[in-house]
Image: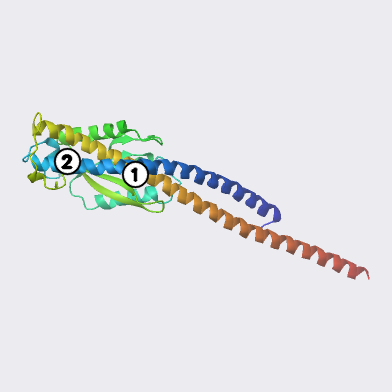
């Protein structure tokens, strides 16, 4: 059995850890609320731009554009969005596992673009070729970051270095659920526009010019939306993990306190027995 000093030291250490996890939970809860507000505000725009793309593509008469070109997939790229830090349960592990599942059995060449330190470190340790990496994005996701990522993959795709591009991110469902999601980014597959053929659109200056402006914006928005979703999921996962850690620390403190009381009781009983034994020997 551990000594009284060891038990007191362990209780003090666990209490210090509990204070840290409780503070981290409060910080993550505040950040999660802000990130959730950003996600909910961005979703209507994301849905609308998809609808507009579908209608315009349906009414443009099959206009050609490099981002719509479908090729035999000889080189496939994955954009993996993870967190820069850990302590968020299985958030990063689930995303990496999802990416590995998608890559398993891939006969084409593989390219990886990582967003976040955890995904980069994982694939770097396993000697994967990382074409581009983005780390240290901070808490407030900037649209310029999505524009940079989109510009990189668009250049690679239009240059025929990538034949397909997939986006792997965590979809924020609610505080307790973050769903790893794989979304095909390139080639752009416009959704079927509702009654697009029944509307007589007038394109100015031309359908090609409109699509040339709309398609890159669509790719940028898809990446920006994925970044927001992942950030909200990260803070939710970290808040949940810190809440569990705080509760586990409380249970451990209770167990250690019970062991401490039992050890003290055993020590007192032993002292009483020694005193009684000594007194009996003097009689």
Q: Residue at x 60, y 50 (%)?
A: 14
| Percent position of residue 199, x then y | 9, 42
Give the residue pinned by disc 1: 40
Q: Residue at x 26, y 49 (%)?
A: 182
Name the foreground residue: 17 vs 8: 17
Q: Residues within 10 Å of mark 1 (few under 14, many from 20)?
A: few
| Percent position of residue 262, x then y | 70, 63
Residue 186 can be seen in this image: no
Element on which disc 1 rests? helix
Number of labels in the image equals 2
Q: Earlier in the sequence, mark 2 or mark 1?
A: 1
Q: Residue furthest front?
A: 199
Indicate whether 25 appears above or below 261: above
Give the residue pinned by disc 2: 53
Q: Residues within 10 Å of mark 2 (few under 14, many from 20)?
A: many
Q: Quadrant of residue 211?
A: top left
Q: Quadrant of residue 65?
A: top left
Question: Are the residues tagged 2 and 1 within 8 Å (C-beta)?
Answer: no
| Percent position of residue 89, x then y | 43, 51
Q: Quadrant of residue 256?
A: bottom right
Give the Cα separation between the discs numbered 2 and 1: 21 Å
| Percent position of residue 46, x then y | 26, 42
Q: Quadrant of the C terminus?
A: bottom right
Residue 18 can be seen in this image: yes
Horizontally, is 234 left or right of 224 in the view?
right
Name the foreground residue: 142 vs 19: 142
């Amino acid at each position: 059995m551990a000594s009284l000093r060891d038990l007191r030291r362990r209780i003090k250490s666990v209490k210090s850890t509990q204070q840290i996890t409780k503070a981290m939970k409060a910080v993550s809860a505040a950040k999660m609320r802000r990130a959730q507000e950003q996600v909910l505000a961005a979703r209507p725009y994301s849905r609308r731009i998809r609808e507009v793309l579908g209608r315009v593509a349906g009414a443009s008469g099959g206009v050609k554009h490099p981002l719509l070109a479908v090729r035999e997939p000889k080189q496939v790229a994955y954009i993996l969005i993870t967190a820069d830090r850990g302590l968020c349960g299985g958030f990063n592990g689930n995303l990496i596992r999802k990416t590995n599942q998608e890559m398993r059995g891939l006969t084409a060449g593989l390219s990886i673009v990582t967003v976040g330190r955890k995904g980069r470190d994982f694939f770097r340790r396993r000697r994967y070729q990382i074409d581009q990496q983005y780390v240290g994005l901070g808490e407030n996701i900037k649209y310029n970051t999505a524009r940079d990522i989109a510009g990189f993959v668009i250049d690679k795709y239009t240059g025929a270095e990538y034949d397909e591009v997939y986006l792997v991110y965590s979809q924020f469902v609610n505080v307790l659920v973050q769903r790893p999601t794989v979304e095909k980014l390139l080639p752009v597959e416009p959704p079927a526009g509702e009654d697009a053929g029944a509307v007589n659109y007038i394109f100015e200056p031309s359908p090609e010019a409109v699509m040339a402006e709309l398609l890159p914006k669509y790719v940028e928005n898809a990446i920006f939306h994925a970044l927001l979703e992942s950030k909200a999921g990260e803070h939710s996962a970290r808040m949940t993990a810190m809440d569990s850690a705080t509760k586990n620390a409380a249970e451990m403190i209770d167990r250690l306190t019970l062991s401490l009381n039992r050890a003290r009781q055993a020590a007192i009983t032993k002292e009483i027995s020694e005193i009684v034994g000594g007194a009996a020997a003097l009689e």
